[in-house]
Amino acid sequence: MAATAAPLAAATGLVTYTRTWTAVDTEPTTCSFVLPAGAKGITYVVQGGGGGMGGLSDRARGAQLSGTFSDVSVPTAIAVVAGGGGRWGGNTDPAATRPAQVGTGGKGFGNGGDAPLPAAGSGTHPNNQVYPGGGGGAGSAILINGAPAVVAGGGGGGGSAGSGYVVGQVSPPNSNPINGNGNAENTGADYEWRVKALDGTTVIRTLTGHGGTGGSASAAGLGGSFSSTGSGYTVGPAGISGNPGGGPSAGTGGNGANGVISDLTSLLSNATPRRNAISSGGGGGGYYGGGSGGAVKGAKDGSDRGNSAGGGGGGGNYVASSAGGVVVVPGASGLGPSGYPDGAPGSVTITFQAAPGFTWTC
């Protein structure tokens, strides 16, 4: 669970204590302890959980915040929450290393949103392809005397896409993220499905699921939208917007939004039904949660079909000017590591100097 460095003797007679708490997969790791009176040189590093990979996509990293706390003259209650990473939703590809399932969001100080699993196809759909998105990473936090001091947002879950066979064309349609992924406080990736003409270059139809926006220290992220271009569709185009993230409540942060489903059935050139079912990425948790991606579907029966779903927005970061009577001095900000295919678990590290004899309680 937690790694502890051995106390180091200091020239002042104080001892340096340090400990790191790391989440386990999607589950948070928590600890409450009391900083002893006279503790000084207090530093922190807080890292949000990463978002899970989507059906065909990359994933987003959580935020990493570092800085210092002012010295404490009285015993001071500290609570830490290391938020879990989001999970990859797998897919129905025979070579997949994980079957299609819910892309579960991480749990922590603001949970990551789930990427839902589309319902199983019926026997009249022998060509099911199911690609859920990725779950959002959870927020990680330090609370001082019960008040949030530092919150690092989780990364948004990856979006997804289901692209079908195109009759008589030089190249098949493609669906790729066309902007960055939803790292903490950032908008999730847009995913665009394209149908190209016989020249292999001219795009004649597109379906785009837009990423959800990230949460912040003052507002929740919004659900992503959807768009389409071109004509000749016999099914759709039809879409659904993503869900908005949530706000903080007593003792915890804002949850990332759950993703939405795009479920498409159309006909192959031999009139056999073909199903492409996907879901958008969940938003990251944080002080305010990120929104989930939007999704869209469309097809020209006997020719082409596809759907696209955007990634989730990242969870919001927060650094108080003071919390529980302790001044918070922000330092560097950046991104945590990128896990694969599941989001990297979040972590919290605290280091301080105090008189000999302190014992960690967790």
Image (spheres, helix red, strand yellow):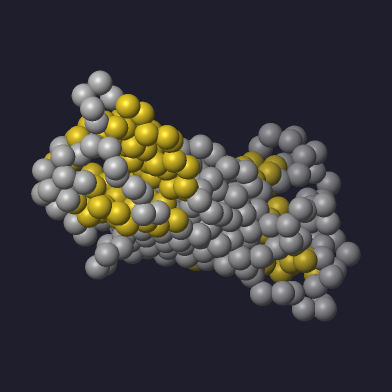
Q: Where is residue 155 in the image (x, y as percent from the top left)?
A: 45, 47
Towards the viewer: 8 or 30? 8
Q: Which residue is drawn at 21% across and 59% down?
A: 146
Towards the viewer: 46 or 190? 46
Relative to 54, 93 lies left or right: right
Number of numbered discs visible in the structure rendering:
0
Q: Residue at x 52, y 63 (%)?
A: 114
Towards the viewer: 40 or 10? 10
Q: Which residue is drawn at 82% across and 52% down?
A: 95
Q: Where is residue 93 in the image (x, y as percent from the top left)?
A: 79, 56
Q: Position of residue 345 (x, y in %)?
A: 51, 48
Q: Which residue is drawn at 55% across and 48% down?
A: 343
- From the viewer's perspective, is residue 133 above or below residue 62? below
Relative to 265, 292 lies left or right: left
User: In this orientation, does residue 343 appear?
Assistant: yes
Q: Position of residue 356 (x, y in %)?
A: 27, 37
Asked which quadrant contains residue 236, the reply is bottom right
